[in-house]
Each structure stands twice: as C-alpha cells, then as structure tokens.
Image (cartoon, rainbow, N blue to C red):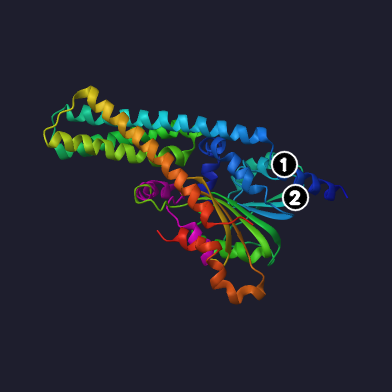
Amino acid sequence: MAQGTATRVSAAIREAQPASARAGRGLRSVLFSVGDGMFLLTVGVVAAACMRLVDSLGWNSVLAWIIGMGLAMLLQTILAFAAAPLLGSIETMVPSMVVAMTCPMVLDFLEMIGVNLGWSWSVALGAGFGFAMFMFVEGYGVLCRKSFRRAGVPR
Amino acid sequence: MSKIWDLRARLYDVCEGSDLRRGPAKADLFRHMRSRALFVAVGTGLEIKRFPPGLEIVGIDISEAMLRRAEPRARRYPGPLRLLQMDAAHLGFADASFDTVVTSCTMCSVPYPVRALQELYRVLRPGGSLLMFEHVRSRNPVFGLALDLMTLWTRLSGTEMNRNTVQNVVAADFRIMSIESAYLDIVLAIRGTKDAPQKNHTQCEAQRGPRGLTHALTVR
C-alpha cells in the first residue's frame, strides 16, 4: 500500500514541470553561456600570451611553435580543471583545447611570414580566438539540439 | 580495473565537478526510471539524489571503495536501494530482472562496452527502458580530434573520451527511442528499449529508429 502511494507520488513529481523551474533553467543557461564566454576569452588571451612570450625569446620558429603551443595547452588544462566544478569538465576542456592549439599556431605562422603583431594585438587576437570559439560552440549547440529533436521522437 | 577506481574514489566527488551543469539534464533522464531499476557504475552515489523516490533500485560498481562512499547516500534514498560490487560485463542477475537499466558516464570506462551493453540487454525485461547519460566522440572533426587527443592521457585513468556509444548501443540490440543533447553532440541523454522477442524479425528496421535517428548519429 505504502509502496503504491510512493509510486504515485513519484509519478506526480516526475510529471510536474512548473513555469518557475523552466524560467530557472533559462537563467542557468544564460549564466553558463556567460561563464563559457569568459572562460574561452581567458584561455585565448593566455594562449596568445604564451606564444608571444616564447616568440620574444627569438628561438627557431618550429621550436617556438612546439614550446608555445605546449605551454599554452598546459595552462589551458590547468584553467579547465579549475573551471570544471562550475562549468563542467568536458564543457571546459574540449573547446578550450582547440583554442589553445590553434591560437599559438596562427600567431607563430604570422611570425614566420614576418608579421609581428606585438603584445597588445597578439592578446587581442587570442581574445578573438576565444570569442570565435564561444560563438561556434553556441551555434553548434543550437544545431545539435535541433538535429537531435528532428531525428528522434521521444515516446 | 577495480584498483584504478578504488584510487579514483578518493577524489571522485571533487573531480566529478560537472554535477552543477549536467544535473538538470540527468534529472530529466532519470525521471523515466520505473519500478525495479539497475544503476550501473553507481560510483560514490552522486546521482542517487536525482532518482525518483519509491523505486526498487540496485546500484552496482566494480570498486569497493566507491561503494563504501556511496553507502551514506544510498541510506538517504527514500526507497529500497541495494549496493553490490559487480562488473558490468558479468552481471549476477537473472535474465529480464529489471524494468529500467541506467548508466551515467559509464560506457567510457568499461573495457568492453558492447559486451557490457549486451549484459544490460540480457537483464532488462522486454519492453523495459535503457537510460544512458554518456559522453561520446563528437561528429565535428575539430572536437572529435580534441577528444581523441584527450583520450591519450585519460586512458591512463581508465576513461576513453572518444567512444561511439550510440553505435555500441545499437550493436547490443537495443532500439534507440530518443537522444537529447546535454552538451553539443558530446554529452548525450540516450533512451532505448529492448524489443519483445516476437518483434525481432523487424529488428533491422527498428534499429534505424525514428526517421533514421541511429544512422544519423552513428555515422561520423
């Protein structure tokens, strides 16, 4: 008897989806987006600064690229671990890894072809990488949700 | 394998810091749990608070240390919840014992995922529900590459970041009912079912799922 009542209560709880809960989820989603954006911007700036720092040492371009990217990815991993409790582990690690790989690569390539951006423009480019990744993740997220909804009909 | 997880148990709650973000999506999935449910790889019991109350649940894990940490959480669950030490690939339950089988970030960590899923298929009753909250390899080549690179070092601690779990679910004969994105096409809430035996002759057709769902998701 008690078991049956508990099952009915649990079914009622499961079905209840108050508007306040939906609104709360919307706010959560916005806050997580803001967090993702800030985090990726930070990673972009740090990655660019790493590459700029290594480039300023005047080493061979390939060596500078390897060390710069390695340093950027190490710091990105530390930042991702630090942000993971708030933003999620995969959610921080995957896009930031792409930023930490590509941003130093582009900066080093520019250096190789003789385009010296200087510190402030390098950092701005890093922030641009972070922002571009954030926009890509947001857009790709929308596409994924739409494609899953189109493909599957929950029963 | 169990030794790795015994070691990871000490820091599991700290490292598993994605609860804040993924919690609501997990709760949405777990509310489909019914009657007698098997939770595979219960870990330190972080997910127990999201189970609907009043169900009869069996939680298994390969690690004794994880189960020890899960015990206080299991005691707080409002319903019968037993914890057992067991390997997902060798379940000590009779065929068709459960109405629902649930996993949460499990299939990245079992050594032979299809074999484990076949065991889940065996213990699930025909018509029962498979509920999986799993991370998989992204179909996006850039994110896919990032996950491949991450796997180079996460593999050392027993976690593969780039598995095609959707394809594995189909390979184990489950029919996929729906897939929802919790984060891009990487973290997914998957709902499947085990068809009744008489429907097996249409299995190939059924495995394609609604409007080619499985095909769309398993082709990289």
Residue interval drawn in magenta: B144-171
Rendered residue at 53%/62% (across/down): B211
The amino acid beneath tag 2 is Leu
Tell me what residue is drawn at x 15 percent, y 28 percent: A116
Q: Residues within 10 Å of mark 1 (few under 14, many from 20)?
A: few
Camera-side residue: A121 or B48? Answer: A121
Residue A25 horizontal/vertical position (percent): 59, 35
Residue in the picture at 43% in, 39% down: A138
In reply to whether residue B153 is colored magenta, the answer given is yes
Q: Position of residue B34 (x, y in %)?
A: 72, 54
Picture coordinates of residue B92, whole percent (x, y): 66, 62
Quarter holding residue B198: bottom right
Residue A16, numbered label: 1
User: Element at badge 1?
Assistant: loop
Outermost residue, top direction? A120
Left or right: B90 in relation to A104: right
- Label 1 amino acid? Ala
Q: Is residue A38 left or right of residue B86?
A: left
**Subunit under mark 2:** B
* Extreme residue in the right direction: A1
Mark 1 or 2: the one toward you: 1
Q: Reply above or below: B147 against A64.
A: below
Marks 1/2: CA distance?
18 Å
Q: Main secondary structure of the magenta part?
A: helix
Is B214 drawn above or below residue B156 in the view shown?
Answer: below
Please give the chain letter of the residue carrying mark 1.
Answer: A
Q: Residue at x 80, y 48 (%)?
A: A8
| Pointer 2 residue | B55
